[in-house]
């Protein structure tokens, strides 16, 4: 069983596979049913449900509200789309690896699932990097960016991100295949089989740099520039009208601060959620003293749960931190925000005998 280079619990082999233990077992008794065999799939099911509902609402609200069709929101839609595809096409297959000792979906799905995992993870990373560069440009050159930061350009960039991710992820489809192994009997595994160890390590390094470290460094640089620029006046006063310019500048800074804060939180969540599994895979691929045992298995399971949780957390960030999103959600789904309140009416300084109930938006 080789480590999955795509930063997820790859379908390369089941967590209960032949190399999940220090030795292979060929006895007649069945494999042990551990707690993670039901706990991890249950956790993945919850993540999938929350992520699908949340990300679908994000896509629906942005696509149906004209005022939300901005460059930043185009990238947010792209990010939500990668999360939806990842949750639908990858997570269920990974969940089956915990209770089932064998890969049962065939050779095509072995290649396809791992390929799509790499595509979505890579598209997510590059989209976050594009969002950060977009916010940096809007902050540093607010007037000039009005001509260039258009939804059309953001859509072109998003399409380019997908095309590039599909091309760069081809090795994941090329080097995955079905293999047989023994673990409490003959089992079928979907393994990652590079021709040489050096090629496998090269792809691990590429994945770590391209879909994690390089985007992370780019994002950090962008936000250092944003923090330095934040608070500086956006326009110069004309005809001595300092008060009006100051008011406009404050409003613009406040709006930019809210949007930037939301993007920062999304990026930080990505860093925290995907960091453990990326570091684990590098250590697993390069550290000669790496031990495959229960402890490392538990660490990898936890790291994968963290990475998958990221696809469900992003919509919550949009809902709680984006004021425009909250307003649009209320308009799109008013029945979810209705509540009955008691409206007491008073006549001549005394309370009217009758009470009436009105329904208003929260």
Image (cartoon, grey):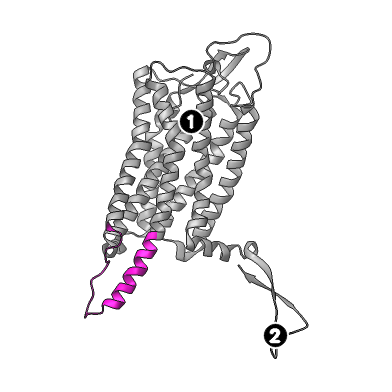
Spatial CA distance of label 1 from label 2 is 68 Å
Classify mark 1: helix, strand or loop: helix
Classify mark 2: helix, strand or loop: strand
Which sits earlier in the primary sequence, circle 1 or circle 2? 1
Q: Quadrant of the C terminus?
A: bottom right
Q: Which dot, 1 or 2, sits closer to the camera?
A: 2
Reply yes or no: does residue 240 show up in magenta.
yes
Which residue lies at the image location 64% right of the left edge and 72% below the top edge? 360
Identify the mark at residue 114; answer none if there is no mark.
1
Reply yes or no: does residue 119 show up in magenta.
no
Which of the two residues, 171 or 245, is positioned nearer the viewer here?
245
Identify the mark at residue 334; answer none if there is no mark.
none
Which residue lies at the image location 39% right of the left edge and 39% below the top edge? 165
Which of the two residues, 289 or 194, is positioned nearer the viewer here?
289
Give the left or right position of residue 153, taking residue 300 as reference.
left
Crowding at label 1, few (<14), some or many (≥20) Cα neighbours within 10 Å?
A: many
Up-down: is 335 above or below 276?
Answer: below
Which residue lies most toward the front here?
349
Up-down: is 38 above or below 356?
Answer: above
**x and y percentages locating residue 62 in the rendered image:** 49, 59
Instruction: Give the image quarter of residue 272.
Output: top left
Q: Which contiguous range is marked in magenta?
A: 229-257
Which residue lies most toward the right here?
353
Say whether residue 325 is visible: yes
Which residue lies at the image location 64% right of the left edge and 36% below the top edge? 42
Q: Which residue is mark 2?
A: 346
């Amino acid at each position: 069983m080789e480590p999955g280079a795509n930063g997820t619990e790859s379908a390369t082999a089941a967590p209960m596979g032949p190399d999940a233990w220090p030795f292979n077992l060929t006895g007649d008794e069945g494999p042990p049913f551990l707690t993670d065999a039901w706990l991890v799939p249950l956790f993945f099911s919850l993540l999938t449900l929350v992520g699908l509902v949340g990300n679908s609402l994000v896509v629906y609200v942005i696509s149906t509200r004209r005022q939300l069709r901005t460059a930043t929101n185009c990238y947010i839609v792209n990010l939500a789309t990668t999360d939806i595809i990842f949750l639908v096409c990858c997570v269920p297959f990974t969940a089956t690896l915990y209770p089932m000792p064998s890969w049962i979906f065939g050779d095509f799905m072995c290649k396809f699932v791992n390929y799509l995992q790499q595509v979505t993870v890579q598209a997510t990373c590059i989209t976050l990097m594009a969002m950060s560069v977009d916010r940096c440009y809007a902050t540093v050159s607010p007037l000039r960016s009005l001509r260039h930061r258009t939804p059309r350009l953001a859509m072109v960039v998003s399409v380019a991100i997908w095309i590039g991710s599909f091309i760069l992820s081809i090795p994941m489809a090329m080097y995955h295949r079905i293999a047989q192994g023994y673990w409490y009997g003959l089992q079928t595994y979907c393994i990652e089989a590079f021709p040489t160890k050096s090629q496998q390590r090269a792809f691990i390094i590429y994945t770590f740099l391209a879909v994690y470290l390089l985007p992370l460094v780019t994002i950090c640089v962008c936000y250092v520039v944003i923090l330095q620029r934040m608070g500086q006046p956006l326009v110069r006063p004309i005809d001595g009208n300092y008060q009006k310019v100051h008011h406009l500048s404050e409003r613009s800074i406040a709006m930019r601060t809210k949007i930037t804060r939301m993007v920062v939180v999304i990026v930080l969540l990505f860093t925290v959620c995907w960091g453990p599994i990326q570091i684990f895979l590098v250590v697993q691929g390069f550290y000669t003293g790496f031990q495959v045992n229960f402890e490392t298995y538990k660490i990898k399971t936890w790291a994968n749960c963290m990475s998958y949780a990221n696809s469900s957390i992003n919509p919550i960030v949009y809902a709680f931190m984006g004021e425009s999103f909250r307003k649009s959600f209320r308009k799109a789904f008013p029945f979810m925000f209705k509540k009955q309140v008691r409206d007491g009416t008073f006549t001549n300084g005394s309370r009217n005998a009758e009470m009436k109930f009105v329904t208003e938006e929260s």
